[in-house]
Every structure is written in C-alpha cells, then in structure tokens.
Image (cartoon, coloured by chain):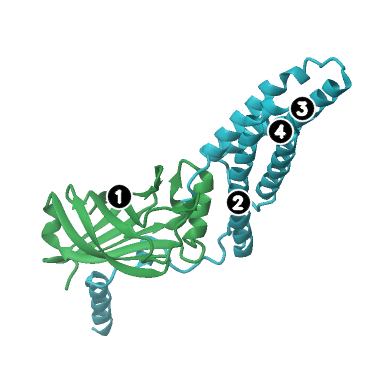
Chain colours: A green, B cyan
Amino acid sequence: METLMALVLTVGQATYHVKYTFKNVEATSTEVKGKINCDAKECEFLLAVPVKSFVSSDSNRDLNMIQVTEAEKYPVATAKGKFPKEVLSQKDAKIEAQVEFHGVSKTYSISLKEKAEKASLVLDLDAHKIERPSLFGIKIKNEMPVDFNFKWKS
Amino acid sequence: MKSFFLLFLLIFSQLSFADISLSELGMSTEPDKNAPTLLPTEEMKERTSKLKTHEVLGLVTLGAMTATLLTGNSVYDNNMHMYLGFTTGALYMATAYYSLTAPKPMGVIDRGRIKWHKGLAWVHFPLMILVPYIGYMYKKNEEDGNKHSSLEKQHRTLAGLLYGTFAISAALMVVEF
C-alpha cells in the first residue's frame, strides 16, 4: 500500500480528568505529537505524549502523578491504530486504538469529533497497573477520561 | 541502473504504508538515561511514605485540636484542656517533622493549593508555640493570684486563629493525582 496523504499534528493537546468522591481535577499537556498516513482506503495513526508534560493547578499533584505513572521508566504514552479514510471527513466517528501507557497495551474505543479535530477516550487505570492514589483512604475513580484537541497539517 | 533501482526502492519504502514510528515524531519510549531525574526511586518512595504519614497525623492533630478547643471552658475544673493541649502540640510537631523531612525534588516550584497549604504554616506554626505558652502563663498567674498580661488575655482569640488556619490548611489538601 502506498501513502497518498500524510497529516502531521501541528497543535496537539491532551487533558486528563481525574474523578474523586469530593472533587474532580484535570491536567493538560500541550506536547502531544501525532501523524496520520493514508492510502486510498485506509489510514494509520500514531499519537504520543510525554507523561511528564501534564500540568494541573497543583505542582504537588503533578509530582505525585509522575511517580505513580513511573514516568521515568515509561516516559511516553502512545495511541495507534487504523481507520477507514472516510472517517477524516465525517463529523463524528468511533475508531479503535491500541493505547500503551505505563508499559501496558490495551485496546480502546476513541470518539472522534469535528473531522478528527477532537477526540476522547476513557482510560482504565487498573488495566494499566496504575496504583490509584487516594485521599483520606478513598481512591480516585478507575475510569479516567482523556480529551484531545488536534490541528492537522498535510 | 542498479543505483536507480536502489533509489526507487528507497523512495518506495519511504512512501509505503509501514507502521509510523515514534522516532518520526521525535520521541522514544526508552527511558532517557541522560535526562535529569526528579529524585531517585528510593527517595521518591520515602517522600510518598512521609507525606502519607503527614496526612494522617495532620488529621489526628486536627481532631486533638478540636477537643482542646472544646475543653477550653473546663480549665478551672480539671487539667483536661492542658493535657489535650500538650497532646496537640506533640502531634503537631510530629506532623511538621514528616512534612519538613520529606525529600523534595530540586527545581519544583510550588503551585496551586499546596502553596497555600505551606503558606498557612507560617501563621499556625508560630501560633502553635505561642498559644500553649500563654495558656500555661495564664494558668500559672491565675494560680499565683497575679495579674494577667494583655497577651495572656488573647489566649482564646489566638487559639481560635490557630485552629482556623490549621483547619483551612488541612482542607486544602489535594488528591495526589
């Protein structure tokens, strides 16, 4: 198969949302990198984000996140997969992606919106062997939604 | 002809539909051995352990401080208020010890709630020394039949300020993720 079109991410942003009994917190990375290669029918993609690059409203939380996710050992989280080319022109779509995070790979369903300018998935922290942090003995929720914003350039 | 064929092969391989690699994005999943680490793993574990202990002791201290405050009016009947005050002071110092001795990575600038949590310590730490002292002086002068100084008369007000700032500091604790 021949690459007929290649899209490169010029602006990539990812935000994770942690849910806790008493409150929700979020952290954002603006260091998401990505590429899409398409032939006549199908596209393949790769997204990557340095785990250390997420910034929340609290420096202590970010420091703990780096430790919990072992960001020194597993510095990058990636998502890769394939989807039909027409997805790029659809307003909303669902695709599958292989997410590697904390050294564990798992397949997720990703919702794409606005012609792949926005995306979201819900990470399963236990599946990635993340020791969920707690406060007052209560752990954060296992499901962690992650939202993406993209600007692609051909 | 051979070089043309090799060139064709090279171009075709670049255009072919192979897996996109991380190196194309300028990244690697391998740990960067040259990158500065925040703290060695053992020290990070020590940090987590000490801050967890700080969290638990802080809550126990808040409980003891509440009890001390509630027994303030019984000071003329028994020594419960004084004993609870000593207990609170000891717990407070133990709480502070675990926070102050937890290893902290270099170059990390405090941001958000933790900044307020630490900032309030500059208020409740001196009060934690002053309030028990003036409470002791008040009781001593009361027993000796001496007049109370103006500072001793502020024991209740300063104790309220101590409790308020300590309680706010505890409420500002954050989820560590």
- Residue bearing mark 4: B81
The residue identified by callout 2 is B51
Label 1 in the same subunit as label 3: no
Q: Which mark is residue A147?
A: 1
Q: Which mark is residue B135?
A: 3
Corner quadrant of residue A96: bottom left
Q: Could you confirm whether marks 1 and 4 are on the same chain?
A: no
Q: Badge 2, how many Cα within 10 Å: few under 14, some, many 20+? A: some
Q: Position of residue B34 (x, y in %)?
A: 57, 64
- From this view, report whether residue A120 is shown above or below residue B96: below
Give a yes or no on whether discs 2 and 3 share a subunit: yes
Query: Are the residues tagged 4 and 3 within 8 Å (C-beta)?
Result: no
Between A141 and B40, the residue placed more toward the observer is A141
Q: Chain of mark 1?
A: A
User: Mark 2 or mark 3, which is nearer to you?
Assistant: 3
Q: CA distance from mark 2 to mark 3?
A: 31 Å
Q: Position of residue B147 (x, y in %)?
A: 84, 14
Frontmost residue, A38 versus B108: B108
Task: Give the image quarter of residue B128.
Answer: top right
Q: Residue at x 72, y 23 (%)?
A: B155
